[in-house]
Image (spheres, rainbow, N blue to C red):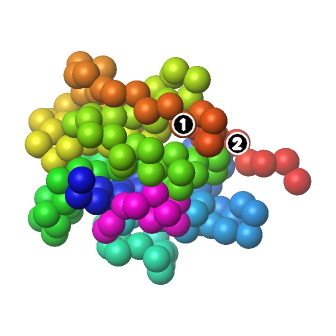
Amino acid sequence: MTPAAGLVLAAGQGRRFGQPKAPVVIDGERLVDRAVRVLREGGCDPIVVVLGAWVGDVPEADDLVSNEMWNEGMGSSLCAGLRHLLDSTTATRVVVTLVDLPGLTGEAVARLVASPAELAAASYDGVRGHPVMINRNHWDALMLTVSGDSGARRYLDQHDVTLVEVGDVASGDDLDEPLAD
């Protein structure tokens, strides 16, 4: 099985959070750096980060993509990242994660990468969550269906998705509100 590319969606402004989440530091590490590290630990290569509302250096990422249309929602970031991967790599699959999943682990990503499925999603106690893994032969069709903040949800709902249980080694909870001091 060839390695999967990693794609971090980190372009949002974090409306509910009160600021872009990518540069937020939790446990001494920025969320964007943590997302890159977790994908790398899970076996992803190369790793691309899509930025927008916040733009900065992400030293461990292989490529940064600036999504000028970040305010249109996650769908535009997913398309920007997939277009970049289509143009710059021969990767046959991609693991797509959100920047605001502080409970995601490399072990969870590795389980997803190990799946032979064309479409796979992390599952937490049987409930589909993030990240998701998408074979390259789905990227063009997927990009035609995304809009706003729905990302790949509609496309995945219309296709067979293999759920890969990771709830025993990770949390799929996203960070929507600042942590209490």
Q: How far apart are marks 1 and 2 (CA)?
A: 24 Å
Q: Residue at x 46, y 70 (%)?
A: 55
Residue 166 is marked as 1
Which element carries disc 2, helix, strand or loop? Answer: loop
Amino acid type assigned to the residue bearing label 2 in the image? Glu
Q: Is residue 44 on the magenta stretch?
A: yes
- Whether 111 is drawn above or below 70: the answer is above
Q: In which quarter of the image is residue 125?
A: top right
Q: Quadrant of residue 85?
A: bottom left
Number of residue marks: 2
Q: Nearer the viewer, residue 71 or 95?
A: 95
Q: Residue at x 23, y 58 (%)?
A: 2
The earlier-in-sequence mark between 1 and 2 is: 1
The answer, for residue 114, to whether it is visible in the render is yes
Q: Residue at x 25, y 27 (%)?
A: 155
- Side of 48 relative to 173 (left or right): left
Which image quarter holds the C terminus?
bottom right
The answer, for residue 151, to whether it is visible in the render is no
Provide residue 24's location: percent of width, then percent of height: 65, 62
Residue reaching furthest to the right: 181
Q: Residue at x 46, y 77 (%)?
A: 60
Question: How many C-alpha atoms fall within 10 Å of the one at disc 1: few (<14), some, or many (≥20)?
Answer: many
Provide residue 20's location: percent of width, then percent of height: 57, 56
Q: Which of 69 and 144 is in front in this view?
A: 144
Q: Do the residues labelled 1 and 2 touch (CB within 8 Å)?
A: no
The residue to which callout 2 is attached is 177
Provide residue 147's location: percent of width, then percent of height: 28, 35
Which element carries disc 1, helix, strand or loop? Answer: loop
